[in-house]
Image (tube, rainbow, N blue to C red):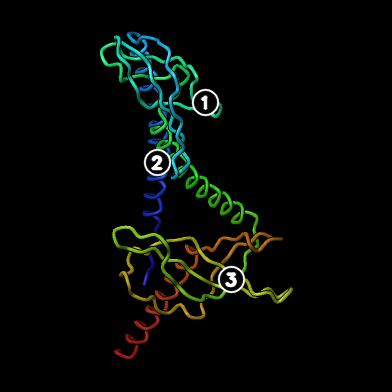
Amino acid sequence: MKFEVHRQHRNFIIFILAASVIIGIATILAGAYLNAADTVNFKETAIETTATITDIHTSSQGGNRHVYVAFHADSREYRGELDYHRSNMYEGEKIQILYAPDNPRNFRSIEQDGKSNTTSAICGLVLLLLGGTGLASVSRRYALKKRLLQDGNKVMAEFLKLKHGNTSVNEEKSLVLICEYKNKTDSVVYTFKSEEFWIANHPPGKELKGLDGALVPVYVKKDDYSKYYVDIDSFFNALGNRDSRHQEDQNSDTNRLSG
């Protein structure tokens, strides 16, 4: 049986991580642009006046501070929550605000003027961090794999088992190969775990046969066995070739008996 190891699903995950980074950056920039445009439009017609802080309330959940002010416009008094606070604010303090002439309830602190939209910035930052962290992790693993294949020591570890990984795409779970190696120098037994992979012609939920006693090539850092790469491609290629030769031998024996 020829095993077709593939990582297309991993490439899809990398695509999702990259898209997350791009969307995160776009969200931050779009939020900043829209906020700046809104601020410019608002300031073109807004009226400046003095407001008085009437109350400062700290919520029991989250500890957020809510600042309430009162001001006069069109011979009427308006009250509402300010869009901004600083640690040294106090009740009775006079601050400058801007309000829309057609709707005085739409007012803003001048001190807050020019700050980016918090919600869009937070959402964009979360996407950026998630995608960036994931891509950085993938990049580090790839760089380590490349170094180990070039300069690492190759050891042959004994196959232990295959288990499902943490990733599932279209109800198809990834696989992880576990193997171990006993260092002849210090008799320490090291356990190695491969990266996640899929086998294209492997039915989901079905166990692979004929792996007991097989040897798995592992590339390790010369002075640090915690840095390693399990060469699953070479392992399954050799396993498939072994099975092919075995099948050819069986066919040859059958043909001789038939003749």
Q: Position of residue 228 (x, y in %)?
A: 60, 61
Do the numbered discs 3 and 1 sit on residues whose CB atoms are within 8 Å? no
* The image quarter in which residue 61 lies: top left
Report the residue at 43% width, 38% height from top. 21
* The image quarter in which residue 40 lies: top left
Any mark on residue 5, and which?
none
Do the numbered discs 3 and 2 sit on residues whose CB atoms are within 8 Å? no
Q: Distance between the residues labelled 3 and 1?
A: 62 Å
Which amino acid lies under the numbered mark 3 shown in the image of this protein? Thr
Report whether 143 appears left or right of 62. right
Report the residue at 52% width, 63% height from top. 231
Residue lying at the far bottom in this picture: please name it. Answer: 257
Q: How far apart are marks 3 and 2 (CA)?
A: 34 Å
Any mark on residue 191, and which?
3
Which numbered disc, 2 or 1, marks the residue that appears first in the sequence? 2
Quadrant, the N terminus: bottom left
48 over 81 or under it: above or below: above
Report whether 227 appears left or right of 194. right
22 over 246 or under it: above or below: above
Question: Which residue is under mark 1?
Answer: 90
Which numbered disc, 3 or 2, marks the residue that appears first in the sequence? 2
| Crowd rating for badge 2 (residues with CA inside 10 Å; few <14, some 14–19, many 20+) | many
Q: Which of 54 and 181 is in front in this view?
A: 54
Which numbered disc, 3 or 1, marks the residue that appears first in the sequence? 1
Report whether 154 appears left or right of 80. right
Residue lying at the far left in this picture: please name it. Answer: 102
Q: Position of residue 107 (x, y in %)?
A: 35, 19
Question: Which residue is under mark 2?
Answer: 20
